[in-house]
Image (cartoon, helix red, strand yellow):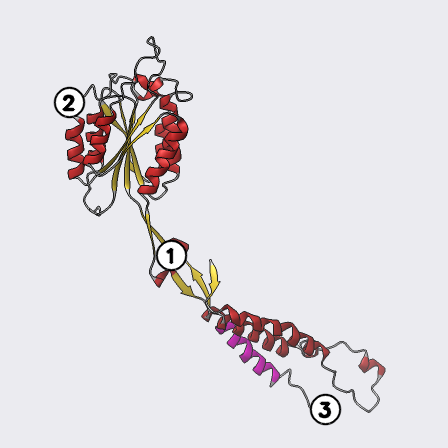
Amino acid sequence: MVTFADPLWLAALALVPLFAWRAMRRPRAPGPDFPVAESAAAAPRTWAARLRGLPTGLRIAAFALGVLALARPQRVDASAAREAEGIDIVLALDASSSMEAPDFFPSRYEAAKDVAAAFIADRPDDRIGLVVFSGEAFTAAPLTLDHDFLLRVLAPPRSEMTVGVADGTAIGTALATAAARLRPAPGDDPRRGRVVILLTDGENNAGAVDPTTAAEAAAALGVRVYAVGMGTESAPFGVAPGRPVGLDESALREVAELTGGRAFRATDAGALYRIYDEISGLERTSVRDAAPAGVRDLFTLLLWPALAFLVLDTALATTRLRRVPA
C-alpha cells in the first residue's frame, strides 16, 4: 500500500494544468517581413519544429514529479506493520453416545461442532488442536495454524470419530491429553498463552486419570481450562427417554478454578455460541505494531526522473530546439 507522509504538497499539482494552458496560449513568434515563396511555405515541418514545445512539457513534468516527491510517497508493508502473537488452544470435545441427544438441533454433538467451527474461524492467529474423547481420549489434530485442515478433521459425524473407541466419558483422560499437547516445545515462548476448552454433557466415568489430578497437572504447565457443560436437565435419548443428563457441574467448576479458568453451562445452542464468544473475548490474541522497517520511502524514484527531465530540457533548449529572439 502506498501512502503520503506530507500529503499537503499534493495541492500544488493544481498548478500543472495552469502551466500547460499558459504554454498552449503562448503567442507564436512573428513571421518574417519579407515574402516567402509558396513552395517554401508548403514545405513539410522539420522534426525540430514539431518538437518545439517539448522543453516546456519536460519542465511541467519535472515540476509534477518534484511535487509528488515533496509529498513523500511511502510503501507500507502491511504484513510487517501488523504482527500478531497468537495463543495455543486445544478443544477437547466429548463424543460419547449421549452427545447424540436431540435437545440441541440436530444433536448435541453436531451443535458443538458448529460452535467449535465458528470459534476456529474467529481465531486466525492462534494454533488450535483437537482432542476427542468418550471412554478414551485421542488427539484428532495437533496444534496447527492450518485451520482448513482442522475443520476437515472436525467435519465427520460422531460415529466416524469414535470407531473402535469404547463408550463412556473420560474427562480426566481428555484433560490430561489436551494439556500434554500444550506442553511447550523447544523454542516456544514460555509466556505464550495456553488454553483448553473442555466441552462435555456428562460426568467422569471412564479412564485412568481423575479430573482433579489432570487439572492440577494442567495448572503446573500454565494451562488455563474453560469447562463447558451442555444439555438440558433431562433429554430424550436412546431407549431411556427423559433420563437425567448426568452432568457433574461441581467437578467442572473445580477443574476450571484449579487452573484459573471458568466453568459454563449451556442449555441451548444460542447459549453455547455466547459462551464461546465470551471465552474468545477473555483470551484475545495480542497485536503489536512492527518497527519502522515496514515503511519504505519512494521519493527518490520520482526525483531522479525529474532531474533527468530538467537536464534534457536544458540540453534541448540550448541546442537544436533553441529559440531565436524575435
Alpha carbon separation for disc pair 3 and 1? 60 Å
Q: Which residue is mark 1?
A: 81
| Position of residue 125 in the picture relative to residue 182 (left or right) | right
Please say if the residues under marks 3 and 2 sit with CB atoms less than 8 Å apart: no
Looking at the image, tell me whether mark 3 or mark 2 is earlier in sequence order: 2
Where residue 323 sits in the image (x, y, percent)?
Answer: 67, 86
Q: Is residue 231 above or below residue 256?
A: above
Please say if the residues under marks 3 and 1 sit with CB atoms less than 8 Å apart: no
Q: Nearer the viewer, residue 257 or 221?
A: 257
For the point 81% across and 81% down, the residue is: 41
Which residue type carries mark 1? Ala
- Which secondary structure, mark 3? loop
Looking at the image, tell me whether mark 3 or mark 1 is earlier in sequence order: 1
Magenta-colored span: 303-317
**Which secondary structure dominates the residues rendered in magenta?**
helix
Alpha carbon separation for disc pair 1 and 2? 48 Å
* Other-residue count near label 2 (Cα within 10 Å), few / some / many at <14 / 14–19 / ≥20: few
Which residue type carries mark 2? Ala
Q: Quadrant of residue 99?
A: top left
- Which secondary structure, mark 2? loop
Where residue 107 sits in the image (x, y, percent)?
Answer: 39, 20
Where residue 166 sits in the image (x, y, percent)?
Answer: 24, 16
Q: Which residue is mark 3?
A: 326
Front tag of 3 and 2: 2
- Which secondary structure, mark 1? helix
Q: Is residue 222 above or below residue 14?
A: above
Where residue 174 sits in the image (x, y, percent)?
Answer: 22, 27
Q: Nearer the viewer, residue 26 or 139?
A: 139
* Other-residue count near label 1 (Cα within 10 Å), few / some / many at <14 / 14–19 / ≥20: some
Which residue type carries mark 3? Ala
Q: Quadrant of residue 253?
A: top left
